[in-house]
Amino acid sequence: MVAMTDMPGRTRPRSRLDRARQLHLLLAAFLALVALASLNVGATGFSLLDVLAKVLRGEALSRTEAVVLWDIRLPRLAMGLVVGAALATSGAVMQGLFRNPLADPGIVGVTSGGMLGAILAIVLGGALPSSLLALTGGYLVPCAAFLGSWATTILLYRVSTRAGRTSVATMLLAGIAFTALAGALAGVLIYKADDQQLRDLTFWNMGSLAGASWAKLATAAPIILTAIAGALFLGRGLNGLALGEATAHHIGIPVQRMKNGAILAVAAASGAAVAVSGGIGFVGIVVPHLLRLITGPDHRALLLNSALLGAALLVAADMIARVVIVPAELPIGIVTAVLGAPVFLWILLRQRGVVDL
Amino acid sequence: MLIVENLSVTLGYKRALTGLSLTARPGAITCIVGPNGSGKTTCLRAMTGDLAYTGRITLGGRDIAALKPWELAALRGVLPQASALAFPFTVSEVVQIGLHNGTSGDHDEITRAALARVDLLRFADRAYQELSGGEQQRVQLARVLAQVWEPVSEGTPRWLFLDEPVSALDIAHQLQVMRIARDFAAAGGGVLAVMHDLNLTAMYADKVVLLAEGTCLAAGTPSEVMTSQTLSRAYGCALTVGRTPPPGTPFLLPHLAAVAAE
């Protein structure tokens, strides 16, 4: 905060937007660094440097090395990047749309719908005809989660849209009601579940990138990347919305079209992210909040910065999840919560009384 | 010209406006006055394209129902009665958001000029949420001014729609805001303001539209509309209009109504 008395006679400080745009490069560099570090570590214990040295000397990689690098570490890294970017960008868009720094994709029902879908698939999946099971293979749970996310979002959207206008407040309240209902249904299913199913469920709920494969990535990444690319165009509209819906309209923003776009982008990005990685919390709230503190709330830069920082932090969290209890690994949701929650609390305490969120 | 023909608005089950017609011309300040619930703000919100209505509203010959939000934004700025800001934007950032579809040119220059106009340039880098209510209202006015910075653009007059622009201000800033509106009109722009303060209305309005129960009770110059009889009928209270020495601006002493009631 610049004190009033500092102002006259001083050259004007560079605007926060300029600084936020410089941060793009910094975050991209950080992201590259984290990505390299993530390729470097793993349970098998050989490093990227060894591999590079081998390649430079013209030696062939051993079969283990090739498999670990190409089929395990790389797809997992790529998945971490897109999922992290999806969660953080969705969070930033939701917060802008609901004009509330605590909003996250969970609010529009994406998470609870996805969870219900996953639980249905895990508990009742065995009852499906075997021909259908063979067709879906290992994709039954992610598919069900994605469908659940989408069905919920569309339902909530329909409930809160009257005469072509979507009430953001109604959507928020309906989302709370739906989350309660989904929780109850999930409770019934959990009551019915056997031990193995319960274990699957718990792990899915805590989130993990362990199942990452090129095939999964090929389905999720196009959806997520398209949604993020679309979301990057919402910056000006979300800035206008910060002044209220009526004022946004007065300054020339097609408000309803923008809301449609934002909800579509969030449902697609976080629906796909939930489907492939389960319930990973905190990234969507902490990342945009942190960036707002550093470079201000201007969405024109915030959205891209969120995508970059979200991707970097999730890959870093996954790296920690993979190495702390080698050879086993922690669910990544535990890492993001353990690291994210105290940081978030610290930020809140430091900010307390200075300025309203 | 702003032409409103046979405007009706229904809010929920309540008919808020019934067959209202009025005109306002650029180069003048038109004030809409009337008691609480008479439909002033509803009328303004219909004219800014925020409410569904029946009837016809044209701005400079163009039907506003057919204009896109960004086309409307280039024609008129709207100052709402109250506005809450989400997220800690600074004062100058708030004004810049208003430039989204307004004037082209050097945005930073216009932002600073608009803030200087409302006497708040020294707060440019402060957080908006730290300002007092009256200061926030003036920042919003600066935002609206920046959006339609030139009162006439390529021969087309632009408009300011102000919803109770002086409600949260001290007397010095009330006068300042009314002078800004006056200057905007003098430069060829149109000003339409919903007003509660009848004395400021009498001082600054070129035309007064008096609403009561969702319809127009009287319209004309302040001297024509603001008579003891008409105002007493509209507000349901015994009011006595006085006159200043020439130019003879009408004024009201609320004290006289109190005397009449006893």
Image (cartoon, coloured by chain):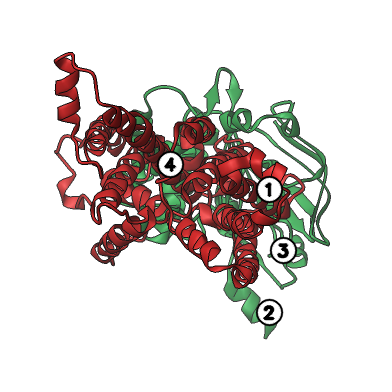
State the mark number for residue A329.
none
Parent chain of label 4: A
Are callouts 3 and 1 both on one chain?
no
Q: Residue at x 62, y 74 (%)?
A: B256
Q: Is residue A351 left or right of residue B233?
A: left
In space, the residues marked 4 and 3 are separated at their CA atoms by: 52 Å
Q: At 37% across and 38% down in the image, what residue appears?
A: A76
Which one is in front in this view, the residue at disc 4 or the one at disc 3?
4
Q: Which residue is mark 2?
A: B260
Residue type marked 3 = Gly
Q: Amino acid at mark 1?
A: Ile
Quick one: label 4 or label 1, which is nearer the N terminus? 4
| Chain appearing in green on the rendered image | B
Query: CB under 8 Å between callouts 3 and 2?
Result: no
Does label 3 or label 2 sit earlier along the sequence? 3
Instruction: Tell me which amino acid carries mark 2.
Output: Ala
Q: Chain of mark 3?
A: B
Residue position marked by numbered label 3 in the rendering: B37
* Residue farthest toward the front in the current orientation of the protein: A63
Residue under label 1: A154
The residue at which mark 4 appears reads as A83
